Amino acid sequence: MNILLFDGPERDQLLPFTFIRPVAHLRIGIDRLQDKWEAFLGVKCGQYTQDYLQPKFPTETAKENLFINPAYIPNQALADKVKTLTLNDALTVDGNILACLTESTLPPEVNSSINCIEVEFSLIHIKTAADLFLNNAAVLALDFKRLTKGKKSAPISSSNQLIAPENIFLEEGAKVECAILNATEGPIYIGKNAEVMEGSMLRGSIALCEQAVVKMGTKIYNGTTLGPYTKAAGELNNVLILGYSNKGHDGFLGNAVIGEWCNIGAASDASNLKNNYGKIRVWNYQTENFAKTDLQFCGLLMGDYSRCSIHSIFNTATVVGVCANLFGTGFPRTFLPSFSYGGAQGLKTYAFEKAMESNAAMMQRRKIALTQIDRDILENIYDLTAKWRKD
């Protein structure tokens, strides 16, 4: 069976984090959506994504294709239900297709030729960028059970203070010394070769993915994931960092999502609550306007390859696109388009080649190359987002 995880209607609501990747490659909890589906289905999955992403994430179709919308968090019951589908059967949630077995090479739509079967149990559905942090704690707990089932934690040094150690798991090569780990309210997962330095305080649920580093004296609260090779310091509360990014100094982030290859300057802070405790409006890429939400807490939503200087400050629910370079004093606008350069004093377009030089330099520090395919994808994003930039 050829399984394709397709970008569903949620894709535009998940921008800026789906600019450079398919929905299936978003991380939430501990691993990516694709990893979760593959674990429960027991097979490798492909993806069906945007045309400009195809060179990096190609689609391979077959005579029969099982299309699955990965924005629904899988469990074993759902995976077993998907496996029972026969040709032209579809699983639906509130009338939207979750999975469909078809001879078509295109993602399915509800029509008279499809036998729709409504899913009868509740699922976690990632519909918007804010849903990534809102659901991170719940998904992290599910991932923890799956990834640690039948396994024994690596030894934890006696130099640490542990509370509820049965909910703490270290993978091979993980290092934790002189830290306080409290897993009473949620699990703590320390990935392969990850490190928690001295004086840090972690209150689960928390996940550190492979090679992530928590620097000395860091405070991390519930619902936080540090993706692979991330460096973190300061204070983080319900923050999802997708990977390869640095928040290596003091400063606060809360109820936030940070993409890959980002850098948060020293002593930078982002508000996650309005002074009047009111509901928050968040930039919506689909309507190209600010949308009302029921959220009271929402911090920084920063797309991949974006950076800010030391002492940067952000208002509640600031949305930053891809490849933004932000600096200067004061609060910038709450929507900063991709390839923005500047801050509160004014913005101009970040020259494409200058942005690529910075990207390549940052990636080189991790011994990873910025490929021509990556450049082509970013050039497409540069063109797609030009309408929001005003020099």
Image (spheres, helix red, strand yellow):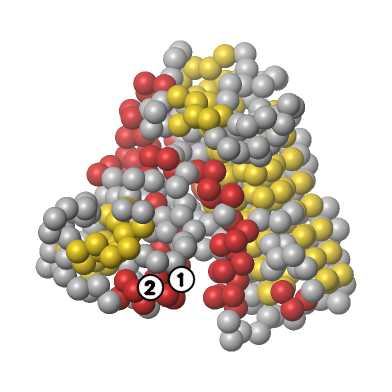
Taking the image as shown, residue 143 lies to the left or right of residue 271, namely left
Checking the image for residue 87, the label placed there is none
Say if 277 sits above or below 65 in the image: above
Check disc 1 and give the amino acid type.
Asn
Say if 241 sits above or below 333 in the image: below
Q: Nearer the viewer, residue 21 or 127?
A: 127
Q: Position of residue 241 (x, y in %)?
A: 59, 50
Corner quadrant of residue 225: bottom right
Q: Position of residue 341 (x, y in %)?
A: 53, 23
Say if 193 sits above or below 148 in the image: above
| Numbered circles on residues, count | 2
Does residue 100 appear in the picture of this structure?
no
Label 1's element? loop
Check disc 2 and give the amino acid type.
Ala
Q: Position of residue 174 (x, y in %)?
A: 68, 71
User: Label 1 vs label 2: CA separation?
Assistant: 6 Å
Does residue 240 appear in the picture of this structure?
yes
The residue drawn where x is 47% and y is 63% is 122
The residue drawn where x is 17% and y is 60% is 114
The quadrant the C terminus occupies is top left
Taking the image as shown, residue 154 lies to the left or right of residue 337, namely right
* Circle 2 residues within 10 Å: few <14, some 14–19, many ≥20: some
The quadrant the N terminus occupies is bottom left
Taking the image as shown, residue 287 lies to the left or right of residue 165, namely left
Checking the image for residue 75, the label placed there is 1
Label 2's element? helix
Q: Position of residue 88 (x, y in %)?
A: 17, 65
Residue matched to label 2: 79
The residue drawn where x is 73% and y is 26% is 276
